[in-house]
Image (cartoon, helix red, strand yellow):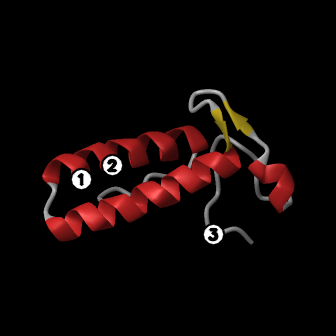
Amino acid sequence: MLKHLSSRYNIEDMDHEERNSIYIPELQMTWGSAWSALRKSWQGFYAARRTGDSESIDTLLERITMIRKYMGLEDGGTYY
């Protein structure tokens, strides 16, 4: 079972290849690319938080929120 379920896409019954090929028009990328961008944004966020770069933190949180929204991932509230 998937750890993350989408409220926009029925990904629970899809295999890895099928899920990664879903096109998300608002992001102009596929699910796989969006997931990669989300993962990299989180990595950047944690790096920025370690260095205290508040401008990057804000930018990355906006990007994370936008990607999660259009992927249909439930918002968990505060990120840190």
Residue drawn where x is 65% and y is 36% of the image: 29
Q: Which residue does the numbered mark 2 point to in the structure image?
A: 60
Instruction: Pick the quarter of the image with the N terminus.
Output: bottom right
Percent x, y of residue 39 = 50, 60
Residue drawn where x is 57% and y is 33% of the image: 27
Q: Residues within 10 Å of mark 2 (few under 14, many from 20)?
A: many
Q: CA distance from mark 1 to mark 2?
A: 5 Å
Reply above or below: 22 against 45.
above
Q: Would you say residue 14 is visible in this rendering? A: no
Q: Which residue does the numbered mark 1 point to in the structure image?
A: 57
Percent x, y of residue 68 = 50, 47
1 or 3: mark nearer the eye: 1
Disc 2 marks a residue whose amino acid type is Leu
Are the residues at dot 1 and dot 2 in contact (C-beta closer than 8 Å)? Answer: yes
Disc 3 marks a residue whose amino acid type is Lys
Q: CA distance from mark 3 to mark 2?
A: 22 Å
